[in-house]
């Protein structure tokens, strides 16, 4: 930490001061008088929500701002040289060789048409005076270092042959090959699975430590930043609102915005007492889903089984969370229960009646089961007004008069906090959080008894997420619907769930009450999931404390190094 | 933004002018467009004949007005035909997918591989060269491109979560299609239909130019242009005015099409 970091007193490697960026056309200030510094070998985090200007501020360091954005004032000193006035040719020499960058999206940051070996070689050939054999040796060494099992084979492989986590390792390898003095990491693990996230982060920390590389870590994830950074810069709407040692910021946040961010972190509430009912509202028995194989010439490739006989019960008023990594089948489970994906075996019972056997049972279920989707930008028809969108589900309610419908829609819109004047507006005029409120209103307008929520808050900013979760919990208490809550975010699940189901590769590996799963996980995969993300708990006086569930694992080195 | 309003104004003015000319032309023209008058043949534009006369002494302005009615009518019907059938085929094909889609699209692509005008020529030989023959032939020739666009739009739309949301609501497939998919196809369709109106106008002119369109002496802009060819040296007004009419109409249609698309799309309404 700051006390144990001997390099922090020396001359900073990077010093940004009074940096102001404006959008050329509208004159809107996107980065306002920002200043921070990074010492050699130090890990500094920039935290902020979307629109905070954190990415632009970081990109300016590489001279990478979009053409529409203009530098108004400020200086960026890197290793004593001024970046903002540097000639393009020198700037290119600094990029890559002295400052490296890892991007958020591993799926698009590697060139899909180039072999890995050649992509890694590019930077070396440009910036280092080495012959082909020397480059090859360095590359193989680095690929081995980032944990590729077959580095020789990887040289001649293409990016699509690797998973997202592996690609991010390769990206890291390509940047670290040049041993830069500073690494800019823009949300490097946001697109990755929770379990992989930690491995990649730790690899990044180890690699940069070995080479004495400083890291500027840009993220919206306060927990992760707090875990790995010695200092944190908090940004909001273009301004640096607070900066300081990570521990200080967590324990004693000074600025209201930082407090708001910390307060938005999901926290576990008390376990709820639910009325014991005999019949579950929804019961799933031995549900099997196969995705058909691809039709090739003359033969069909084997179908892929996405769900291997899932059994699950949701009792009245209960929130059951389904967690798992990508590819665990949790989304398929939600979609097949919602009737969007055909099951190839098993049955679904609604109020004890199998829904596939009779038309009346099916319609009863159809009217009572609703869904909230992940992406509020694609789940609302762009050509319909908010009022029309929320009215639509009522069309199928038998015997409901127009006046009643109107009153119900107004009531529900008021419930989700979009009361006055929103009915006339269109989705594109709303923010992501407001859109998700519309999606929730549409789901509850028929007063369903069962709602499936597929990652309902994972596309939202931290503070908005907290508001939407609160709204959801409030509606759930008020109307008492049961909920299947699908999420990869354990923090959110810990806050909302009564019961947790852990899935892996199309099977349920563990289920139990929330406290059982989070405090005393039995299955190895559950333990792995839980140990992948740091938890935050309130320290009582407005600050938070960082902790690792299941204790500090041995594989992690202490932060201060 | 001022530009869209300006575009709409110019486009609207041009098309309005065309419609007025076509409407009047159907009822009244300064002279009888078919009346021959050999004393006045190939007269230059003058106070009596504003746009001059042709090789038979017929008034060019009167013929342009009468021709506008024919040309506009043919183009409108053709576009309507192509859009209706193309949309139906595209919606169906994009929604059912699977082998039905593959068969329909293979056939569609085969038709697309022919240049539209060649296809229309072949079809005209079958249905006969007259006003309705042209409409049917060009309509069929332009259907595949509509089908292709609509199918592509449907394929991308049906992966959107709001389609899944509609199904979860319990809406039938037909309702989902009519309420959510079709309206979202309108923007690309408007763009396509307006540019197609231009192409059809040109194609009709070309067919008439080749002598396969509306048979003389009835005037269309195409056969007027064709008729002007031998006299281009002595009486260039014969070619220039029909050509100008075609160009201005195309310009007007394109400007108006953009404006209409923006108007129909709620996402664009806030822009002005």
Image: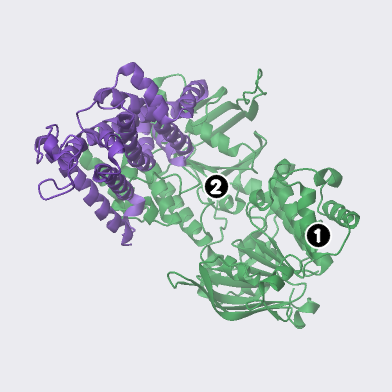
Compared with A227, A160 (above or below) is above
Q: Going by the image, does B243 lie left or right of A217?
A: left
Residue displayed at 31% across by 24% down: B136
The chain coloured purple is: B
Q: Residue under mark 2: which chain is it in?
A: A
Q: Are marks 1 and 2 in contact (CB under 8 Å)?
A: no
Q: Going by the image, does B197 lie left or right of A246?
A: left
The chain coloured green is: A
Q: Give the residue at mark 1.
A: A125
| SS state under label 2 | loop
Compared with A9, B197 (above or below) is above
Q: Give me the disc on residue A395.
A: none
Compared with B46, A51 (above or below) is below
Measured as percent of width and height from the top left, residue A480 is found at: 42, 43
Quarter of the image with the N terminus of chain A in it: bottom right
Residue A17 seen in render: no
Quarter of the image with the C terminus of chain A in it: bottom right
Q: Residue under mark 1: which chain is it in?
A: A
Comparing B102 with A190, the one in front is: B102
Q: Earlier in the sequence, mark 1 or mark 2?
A: 1
Q: Which of the 4 quarters of the picture holds residue A66?
A: bottom right
Q: Which of the 4 quarters of the picture holds residue A88?
A: bottom right
Residue A60 seen in render: yes
- Between disc 1 and disc 2, the foreground one is 1
Comparing B87 with A231, the one in front is: B87
Q: Give the residue at mark 2.
A: A497
Callout 2 crowding tier (Cα within 10 Å): few <14, some 14–19, many ≥20: many
Measured as percent of width and height from the top left, residue B223 is found at: 27, 33
Measured as percent of width and height from the top left, residue A521 is found at: 70, 45
């Amino acid at each position: 930490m700051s006390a144990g970091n001997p390099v922090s007193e020396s001359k900073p490697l990077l010093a940004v001061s009074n940096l102001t960026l404006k959008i050329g056309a509208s004159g809107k200030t996107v980065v306002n008088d920002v200043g921070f510094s990074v010492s050699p070998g130090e890990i500094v985090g920039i935290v902020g929500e979307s629109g905070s200007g954190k990415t632009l501020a970081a990109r300016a360091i590489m001279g990478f701002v979009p053409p529409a954005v203009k530098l108004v004032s400020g200086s960026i000193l890197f290793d004593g040289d001024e970046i903002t006035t540097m000639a393009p040719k020198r700037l290119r020499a600094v990029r890559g060789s002295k400052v490296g960058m890892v991007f958020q999206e591993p799926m698009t940051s590697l060139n899909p048409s180039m072999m890995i070996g050649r992509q890694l070689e590019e930077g070396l050939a440009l910036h280092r005076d080495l012959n082909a054999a020397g480059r090859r040796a360095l590359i193989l060494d680095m690929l081995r270092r980032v944990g590729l099992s077959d580095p020789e084979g990887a040289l001649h492989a293409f990016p699509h042959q690797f998973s997202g986590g592996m690609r991010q390792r390769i990206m890291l390898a390509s940047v670290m090959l040049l041993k830069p003095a500073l690494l800019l990491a823009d949300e490097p693990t946001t697109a990755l699975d929770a379990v992989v996230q930690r491995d990649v982060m730790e690899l990044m920390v180890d690699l940069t430590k070995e080479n004495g590389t400083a890291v500027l870590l840009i993220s919206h994830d306060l927990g992760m930043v707090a875990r790995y950074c010695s200092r944190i810069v908090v940004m909001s709407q273009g301004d640096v609102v607070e900066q300081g040692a990570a521990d200080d910021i967590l324990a004693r946040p000074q600025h209201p915005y930082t407090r708001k961010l910390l307060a938005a972190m999901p926290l576990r509430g008390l376990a709820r007492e639910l009325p014991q009912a005999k019949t579950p509202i929804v019961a799933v028995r031995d549900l099997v889903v196969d995705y058909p194989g691809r039709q090739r010439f003359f033969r069909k490739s084997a179908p892929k089984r996405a769900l291997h006989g899932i059994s699950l019960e949701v009792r009245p008023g209960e929130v059951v969370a389904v967690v798992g990594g990508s590819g665990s089948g949790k989304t398929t489970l939600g979609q097949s229960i919602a009737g969007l994906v055909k099951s190839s075996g098993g049955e679904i019972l609604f109020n004890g009646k199998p829904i596939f056997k009779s038309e009346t049972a099916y319609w009863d279920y159809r009217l009572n089961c609703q869904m909230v989707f992940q992406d509020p930008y694609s789940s609302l028809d762009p050509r319909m007004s908010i009022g029309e969108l929320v009215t639509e589900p009522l069309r199928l309610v038998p015997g409901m008069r127009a006046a009643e419908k109107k009153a119900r829609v107004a009531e529900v819109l008021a419930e989700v906090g979009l009361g006055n004047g929103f009915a006339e507006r269109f989705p594109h005029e709303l923010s992501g959080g407001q859109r998700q409120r519309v999606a929730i209103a549409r789901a509850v307008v028929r007063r369903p008894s069962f709602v499936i929520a597929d990652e309902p808050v994972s596309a939202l900013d931290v503070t908005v997420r907290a508001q939407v979760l609160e709204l959801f919990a409030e509606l759930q208490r008020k109307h008492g619907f049961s909920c299947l809550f699908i999420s990869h975010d354990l923090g959110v699940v810990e806050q909302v769930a009564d019961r947790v189901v852990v899935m892996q590769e199309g099977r349920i590996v563990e289920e139990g009450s929330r406290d059982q799963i989070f405090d005393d996980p039995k299955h190895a995969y559950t333990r792995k999931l839980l140990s992948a993300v740091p938890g935050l708990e309130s320290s009582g006086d407005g600050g938070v404390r960082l902790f690792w569930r299941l204790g500090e694992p041995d594989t992690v080195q202490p932060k201060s190094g | 933004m001022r530009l869209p309003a300006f575009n709409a104004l110019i486009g609207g003015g041009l098309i309005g002018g065309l419609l007025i000319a076509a409407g009047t032309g159907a009822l009244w023209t300064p002279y009888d467009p078919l009346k021959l008058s050999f004393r006045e043949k190939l007269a230059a534009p003058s106070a009596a004949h504003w746009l001059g006369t042709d090789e038979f002494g017929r008034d060019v302005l009167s013929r342009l007005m009468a021709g506008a009615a024919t040309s506009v009518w043919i183009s409108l019907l053709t576009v309507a035909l192509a859009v209706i059938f193309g949309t139906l085929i595209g919606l169906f094909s994009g929604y059912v997918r699977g082998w039905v889609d593959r068969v329909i699209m293979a056939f569609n692509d085969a038709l697309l591989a022919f240049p539209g005008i060649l296809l229309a020529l072949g079809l005209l030989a079958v249905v006969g060269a007259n006003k309705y023959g042209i409409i049917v032939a060009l309509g069929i020739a332009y259907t595949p491109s509509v089908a292709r666009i609509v199918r592509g739009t449907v394929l991308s739309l049906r992966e959107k979560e709001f389609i899944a949301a509609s199904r979860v609501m319990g809406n039938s497939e037909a309702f989902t299609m009519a309420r959510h998919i079709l309206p979202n196809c309108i923007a690309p369709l408007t763009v396509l239909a307006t540019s197609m109106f231009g192409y059809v106008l040109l194609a009709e002119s070309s067919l008439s130019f080749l002598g396969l369109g509306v048979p003389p002496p009835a005037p269309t802009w195409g056969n007027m242009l064709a008729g002007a060819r031998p006299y281009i040296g002595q009486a260039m007004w014969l070619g220039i005015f029909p050509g100008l009419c075609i160009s201005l109409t195309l310009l007007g249609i394109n400007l108006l099409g953009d404006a209409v698309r923006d108007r129909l799309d709620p996402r664009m309404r806030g822009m002005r």
